[in-house]
Amino acid sequence: MSFLKNLLGMGHHGGGNHGGGNTPHLQRNKHHGASQSHGGSRQNDWGNVPADQNNCGGCNSGNPSGARFCQQCGKPLPLKNCGGCGAAKTAGAKFCANCGTPQ
């Protein structure tokens, strides 16, 4: 039914007093691209995770680099540095290359 309304000009973008009166379409429907009212920039930020952000393995929310627990679900976050000496961890390593602490 909505297809027919749109086709005949009676749907959301047509008449039907959406916004009222004789107001021109673009002024009446600013939420369709004439303004940024729905939350800022139109650029796509998918996949642009800041380098200092640590994503939770449980809920996938972003957390600051030094956080030990997720700010959203409370699960412990994996350490990026060795707990013994603070050196950067090597992915897949069972022991720290710097001090030998088990990872």
Image: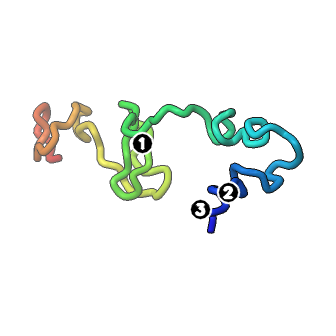
Q: Earlier in the sequence, mark 3 or mark 1?
A: 3
Q: For marks 2 and 1, give the one nearer the viewer.
A: 2
**Residue 1 at x, y percent in the picture:** 62, 68
Q: Provide the residue designation for mark 2.
A: 8
First in residue order: circle 2 vs circle 3: 3
* Other residues around mark 3 within 10 Å, as few (<14) / some (14–19) / many (≥20): few
Residue at the spot of label 1 = 67
Considering only vertical position in the picture, is 94 above or below 48?
A: below
Q: Is residue 76 left or right of residue 82?
A: right
The residue shown at (41%, 56%) is: 59
* Mark 1 surroundings within 10 Å by alpha-carbon count, few (fewer than 14), some (14 through 19), many (20 or more): some
- Looking at the image, how many numbered discs can be counted on the residues? 3
Disc 2 versus disc 3: distance between alpha carbons? 9 Å
- From this viewpoint, which residue is outermost toward the front? 8
Cα distance in 3D space between marks 2 and 1: 56 Å
The colouring scheme, among rainbow, by chain, secondary structure or one colour, is rainbow
Is 53 left or right of 13, judged from the image as shown? Answer: left
CB-based contact (under 8 Å), mark 3 and mark 1: no
Q: Secondary structure at mark 3?
A: helix
- In the rendering, which numbered label is found on residue 10? none
Label 2 Cα crowd, 10 Å radius (few <14 / some 14-19 / many 20+)? few
Please tell me whether mark 3 or mark 1 is closer to you in this view. 3
Q: Which residue is nearer to you in this view: 74 or 5?
A: 5
User: Which percent across, then down, holds residue 43?
Assistant: 49, 32
Q: Which of the labelled discs sits on residue 3, or is there none?
A: 3
State the separation of the CA atoms marked 3 and 1: 50 Å
At label 2, the amino acid type is: Leu
